[in-house]
Image (spheres, rainbow, N blue to C red):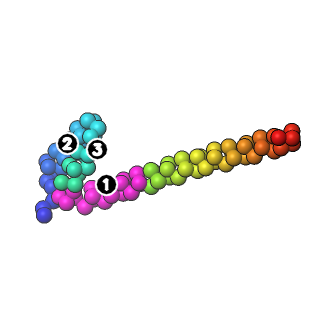
């Protein structure tokens, strides 16, 4: 498959910007997939690098959120244990 010409690449970027502004991730992915094979190797590598970076950042955010939930759950469990000890000391 032949690589895009400069004019086609410019049109690709304009369309990409327009789809990004519209916020349709599904259409954006479909558009990129449709044209990916014809993009210059440098652009393909940049897109893959950006996608990998985004995936890593998403994974880190998810792990931080899970850790925060775990920490909150642990704090709640400790608070319940403290309340249980108070009740037991009061003769309950």
Would you name the residue on which mark 1 appears? Answer: 47
User: Which quarter of the figure has residue 92?
Assistant: top right
Q: Nearer the viewer, residue 42 or 60?
A: 60
Distance between mark 1 and mark 3 Cα atoms: 15 Å
Do the numbered discs 1 and 3 sit on residues whose CB atoms are within 8 Å?
no
Distance between mark 3 and mark 2 Cα atoms: 13 Å
**Disc 2 crowd, CA 10 A, few/some/many (<14, 14-19, 20+):** some
Residue at 23% x, 45% y is 27
What quarter of the picture does the N terminus occupy? Answer: bottom left
Would you name the residue on which mark 3 appears? Answer: 25
Q: Which residues are magenta?
A: 36-55
- Position of 5 with respect to 45 (left or right) is left
Residue at 49% x, 50% y is 62
Which type of secondary structure does the marked residue at label 1 adopt?
helix
Question: Looking at the image, is mark 1 or mark 3 nearer the viewer?
Answer: 3
Would you name the residue on which mark 2 appears? Answer: 15
**Disc 3 crowd, CA 10 A, few/some/many (<14, 14-19, 20+):** few
């Amino acid at each position: 498959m032949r690589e895009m010409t400069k004019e086609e690449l410019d049109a690709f970027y304009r369309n990409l910007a327009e789809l990004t502004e519209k916020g349709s991730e599904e259409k954006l992915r479909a558009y990129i997939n449709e044209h990916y094979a014809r993009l210059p190797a440098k652009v393909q590598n940049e897109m893959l690098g950006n996608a990998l970076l985004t995936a890593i950042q998403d994974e880190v955010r998810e792990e931080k959120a899970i850790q925060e939930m775990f920490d909150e759950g642990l704090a709640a469990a400790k608070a319940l244990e403290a309340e249980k000890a108070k009740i037991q000391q009061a003769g309950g």
